[in-house]
Image (spheres, rainbow, N blue to C red):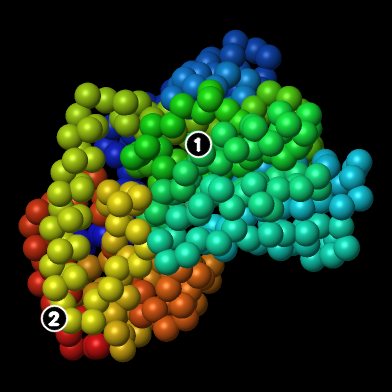
Amino acid sequence: MIYVDAQASTPIDPRVAAAIEEVYAAELANPHSTHMAGQTAMKYVDDARRTIAQFFGVKFNEVVFTSGATEANNLAIQGVVRKALQSMERVEIITTPIEHSAVLEPIQALKDQYPERVHVRYLSVGESGVVDANELSEVLSDSTVLISVMHANNEIGTIQPIRDIARLIRKWKAEQGSAYPYFHSDGAQAPFFISENLSYGPVDLYSISGHKIYGPKGVGALIVREGTAIQPLFYGGGQEYELRPGTVSPELAHGLKAALDCIQSADHDAIVTEMLTLRNRLLGELLDIPGVLLNGDLESRLPHNINISVDGLSSETAIIQFDLAGVALSAGSACHSGAFEPSHVVEAVAGPDRAKSALRISLSQFTTQKEIDTVIHSSQHILKKLS
Ligand SMILES: Cc1ncc(COP(=O)(O)O)c(C=O)c1O
């Protein structure tokens, strides 16, 4: 099978798998136990926390382990908004219509629970799928407590100007003398390609996920900058600085560390350059097929992502045809139940018709030239036949 669905989940890097196996073989105790065996286990968690902190330029105690980016996003959004609701009657959240459902749905849940008190504004993204940071200054208000703008989109790969957004928020906060709003960015898709040192601030909250960077599934982290007013979602133990109770897995934390170590290895830039070359070759061939259009901006885009719509095509039928031809790709976000839903992201940037005919191809670091040749061949056949 040719796997070009790396934005749904990256194949685990063999170096990461080896590192995790080594930790499982060590048969670790509960890292939160006080005995020596517990301390040995905690060392793995601490090492992982240190690596994440260094990678993103934040403090050791600003890293909170979670089960992935979904939980990190929920903690960031619900944690900040629920805390703010303790002292404010009306709160506003600013986000974009192209966020992952792990951002849009917790926001909607808050709105449903507090219809009179929680208000949401969506920044426009236009056809490019990139927000204009300046639009923020027009919509910020005294009641804005949280801005959540993803770092890189999981469907169309567009990269958002989070530095510009952060700069604008910093200026606004300084002028108002206010602690709010906080800035959250869902960084699940970004770290393999964009090395972001968050110390410039104020990115107050940043979500990451292991299985989007060739690490294990079931682990991620939320970076919570010191002083952020936030409350936990769960209760039951004081782990993770009282923000996320439950036993941290030293094995998975170590896997996340190993994935970040790989990104910092000497061959990383060459790997990304090769991915870009292969992506561009494939994209060039796809755009030569009649009726094929690219969704989202090409320049401000992750180097492994392609998202196209094809006149007259049904995404669902095309995915099955590609699957039968041995090519795993998708229509966008990996869906909740296996049921097919047109992409809300493509709909927001290109309209409902383009959403129904959208296909996402996301290369992995292991994708070869030969595999790309096969994808080109299958695409020429399938897209012409179905459109
Ligand atoms: C942008 C983005 N945010 C959040 C998630 C959810 O991540 P996880 O599977 O780690 O919960 C994903 C995964 O598809 C994603 O792409």
**In which quadrant is the C terminus drawn?**
bottom left
Residue 140 — which label?
Answer: none
Q: 37 or 75, which lies in front?
A: 75
Question: Tag 2: residue type?
Answer: His
Residue 385 visible, this orientation:
yes
The picture places residue 213, in percent across and down from the top left corner, at: 38, 41
Q: Is residue 172 above or below residue 47?
A: below
Q: 24 or 323, which lies in front?
A: 323
- Kindly state the secondary structure of the residue where label 2 is placed: helix
**To which residue does mark 1 refer?**
163
The picture places residue 331, in percent across and down from the top left corner, at: 38, 71
Q: Residue at x 25, y 59 (%)?
A: 3
Q: Residue at x 31, y 26 (%)?
A: 264
Left or right, residue 203 beside residue 359:
right
Residue 381 — which label?
Answer: 2
- Kindly state the secondary structure of the residue where label 1 is placed: helix
Callout 2: CB less than 8 Å from ligand 1: no
Q: 341 or 118, which lies in front?
A: 118
At label 2, counting other C-alpha atoms closer than 10 Å, the crowd grade (few under 14, some 14-19, many 20 or more) is: few
Q: Residue at x 56, y 41 (%)?
A: 165
